[in-house]
């Protein structure tokens, strides 16, 4: 944990934004390994793929567009330091009453959690308790989260529009130097199918081990991004057309909400999967499968779309004066 | 037999950590970007491979063994390709490697080009 | 009060304060976003470290284990991580647009341009104000 503090302090002091972004990637990776040592395997998986992968990538893409160095500030930050120290002291005073690290009888473990742990196998039948809580017991929150990802995709699309008149330039947009990167292309051709297959594995294995929709969507997007980086944006946009991606973004959310509405039509509550099949446990399995699939589709297509928008912006500056 | 496997895996884990540490020392001490990449990529791939082999010996015959094998193959492929990509990108943006000129006496530091 | 038992909360507070400081004291917008990410991650630590039980296993049901770590913080933080990346992506696209509109992403320069634009708009709308040059006249003469 002290490594994390040191990395964060280094981020404060540096002026070179490229180094800051790299350090934040290291920070995310360190925190992922720290989550693993705290028994949070799903969270570590998500933090490693999202924080150390997609986040660093997006920061680097925007760094290309805005400039690499930070200007020195002209005023002394004494007031900011004062506020920070006072707030920190108040927070530390507030932690004096907190339960100790790792004690099994703190109040957080008393009320709802034993019910989830004890009854999850009987009511839902899925070994990964986090997936069962995420998709079934707290399924409504996950619907909201998918909608947040969808909204972010729409927001980025509306902010960084691809203008129509440059559409015919897209086929020429493979940078010439990328043609010569034989080693990278061969290795990528070997690895990209494996990455996509691994994403599908994580998606469907989320019931039995760490995994689920979010991690799978991000890994799928990472495979597509690798393809885009090596084979050019024009080719990637021909393979993953913009209309298809936008359609897929909406389809995932529609699938999630649609499962809820179908449950209502069959006589249960919204997102009560027990009524989907003759047997409650099979209904829960089917519901969790469909719902995670919807989440994975939305997350993958939104991440790919956001990356395409950012990269198109950098390429547009280079090729259209 | 168990003891033999344990000793062997201890040996692998310890040597793997040793190689990773020397790679880190090389990252800090070498004078030039290219020599640093060379040091870290070689030692990190070897170190990670040895650590994974030690873990494979500890895992026994089960589902974990092929997964560790695949992680080993992936780290071989991805690690070396990543350092190749870094070196190529550095060359393309104009960074030249530090070359030893003939005028230097043995024992002197090489001059920057 | 046991210090070792509370150490994890103090590190969380330290990281939170570092992120907070970056957000309010630095001017560059991208650095502020990185500071916001640090702040968010420290809150994740807070929740996850509260959910850990000594001697327990990750919450995946298995016959060999009896004691599991609390799965509820894991679910909350999973949602929080994804929401964090969504807001970061949106924030970065806003920064890109600000750069194109203002020409820089330092907060002080953006404020200068904003004030300048505001004064220009007022000048256009209301005309020039009363003539204060009379105050420059030398009144000792």
Image: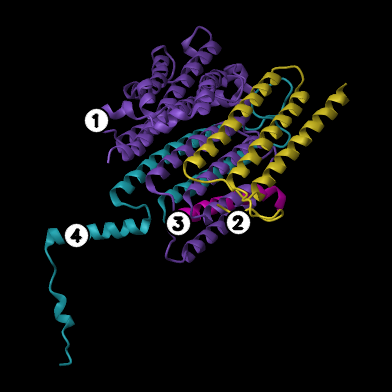
Chain colours: A purple, B yellow, C cyan
- Say whether mark 2 and mark 1 are on the same chain: yes
Q: Nearer the viewer, mark 1 or mark 2?
A: 1
Q: Which residues are magenta?
A: C1-24
Along the line of sight, the residue nearer the viewer: C28 or C130 = C28
- Looking at this rendering, what residue extends furthest in the bottom direction? C141
Residue bearing mark 2: A93
Q: Is residue A195 left or right of residue A170?
A: right
- C66 is higher (above) or lower (below) than A319: above
What residue do we see at 68% from left, 24% from top? B68
Number of other residues with Cα within 10 Å of mark 2, as a class: few under 14, some 14 to 19, many 20 or more? few
Q: In what element is the residue under mark 3? A: loop
What residue do we see at 34% from left, 37% from top? A313
Dominant secondary structure of the residues highlighted in magenta in the image: helix
Q: Position of residue A150 (x, y in %)?
A: 38, 30
Is residue C20 within the magenta segment?
A: yes
Q: CA distance from mark 4 to mark 3?
A: 28 Å
Q: CA distance from mark 1 to mark 2?
A: 57 Å
Residue bearing mark 4: C120
Label located before the other in sequence (1 or 2): 2
- C3 is higher (above) or lower (below) than B88: below
Q: Position of residue C106 (x, y in %)?
A: 38, 55
- Mark 3 falls within which chain? C
Q: Nearer the viewer, mark 3 or mark 2?
A: 3
Q: In what element is the residue under mark 1? A: helix
Q: CA distance from mark 1 to mark 4?
A: 34 Å
- Mark 4 falls within which chain? C
Number of other residues with Cα within 10 Å of mark 3, as a class: few under 14, some 14 to 19, many 20 or more? many
Q: Nearer the viewer, mark 1 or mark 4?
A: 1
């Amino acid at each position: 944990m002290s490594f994390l503090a040191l990395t964060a302090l280094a981020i404060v002091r540096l002026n070179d934004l490229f180094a800051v972004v790299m350090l934040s990637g290291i920070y995310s990776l360190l925190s992922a390994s720290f989550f693993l040592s705290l028994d949070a395997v799903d969270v570590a998986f998500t933090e490693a793929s999202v924080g150390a992968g997609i986040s660093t990538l997006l920061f680097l893409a925007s760094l290309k567009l805005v400039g690499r160095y930070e200007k020195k500030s002209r005023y002394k930050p004494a007031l900011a330091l004062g506020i920070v120290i006072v707030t920190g002291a108040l927070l530390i005073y507030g932690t004096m009453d907190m339960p100790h690290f790792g004690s099994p009888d703190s109040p957080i473990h008393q009320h709802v959690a034993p019910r989830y742990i004890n009854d999850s196998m009987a009511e839902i039948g899925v070994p990964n308790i986090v997936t069962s809580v995420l998709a079934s017991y707290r399924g409504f929150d996950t619907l909201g989260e998918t909608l947040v990802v969808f909204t972010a995709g729409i927001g980025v699309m509306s902010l960084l529009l691809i203008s129509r008149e440059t559409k015919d330039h897209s086929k020429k947009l493979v940078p010439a130097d990328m043609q010569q990167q034989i080693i990278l292309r061969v290795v990528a051709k070997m690895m990209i199918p494996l990455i996509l297959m691994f994403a599908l594995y994580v998606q469907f294995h989320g019931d039995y081990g760490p995994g689920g929709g979010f991690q799978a969507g991000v890994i799928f997007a990472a495979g597509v991004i690798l393809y885009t980086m090596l084979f050019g944006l024009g080719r990637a946009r021909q393979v993953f057309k913009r209309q298809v991606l936008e359609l897929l973004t909406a389809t995932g959310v529609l699938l999630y909400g649609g499962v809820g509405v179908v449950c209502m039509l069959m006589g249960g509550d919204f997102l009560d999967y027990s009524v989907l099949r003759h047997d409650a446990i099979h209904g829960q399995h089917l519901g969790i499968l469909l719902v995670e699939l919807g989440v994975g589709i939305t997350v993958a297509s939104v991440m790919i779309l956001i990356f395409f928008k950012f990269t198109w912006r950098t390429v547009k500056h280079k090729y259209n004066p | 037999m168990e003891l033999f496997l344990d000793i062997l895996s201890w040996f692998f884990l310890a040597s793997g950590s040793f190689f990773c540490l020397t790679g880190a020392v090389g990252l800090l001490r070498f004078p030039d970007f290219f020599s640093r990449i060379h040091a870290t990529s070689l030692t990190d791939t070897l170190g990670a491979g040895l650590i994974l082999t030690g873990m494979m010996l500890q895992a026994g015959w089960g589902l974990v063994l092929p997964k560790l094998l695949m992680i080993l193959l992936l780290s071989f492929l991805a690690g070396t390709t990543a350092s190749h990509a870094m070196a190529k990108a550095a060359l393309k943006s104009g960074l030249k490697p530090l070359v030893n000129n003939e005028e230097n006496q043995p024992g002197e530091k090489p001059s920057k080009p | 009060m046991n210090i070792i038992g509370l150490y994890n909360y103090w590190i969380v507070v330290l990281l939170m304060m570092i992120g907070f400081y970056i957000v309010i004291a630095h001017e560059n917008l991208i650095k502020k976003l990185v500071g916001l990410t640090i702040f968010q991650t420290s809150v994740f630590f807070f929740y996850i470290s509260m959910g850990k039980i000594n001697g327990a296993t990750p919450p995946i049901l298995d016959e060999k284990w009896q004691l599991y770590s609390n799965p509820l913080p894991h679910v909350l933080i999973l949602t929080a991580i994804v929401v964090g990346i969504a807001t970061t992506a949106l924030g970065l696209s806003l920064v890109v647009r600000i750069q194109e509109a203002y020409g820089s992403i330092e907060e002080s320069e953006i404020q200068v341009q904003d004030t300048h634009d505001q004064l220009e708009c007022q000048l256009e709308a209301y005309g020039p104000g009363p003539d204060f040059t009379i105050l420059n006249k030398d009144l000792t003469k």
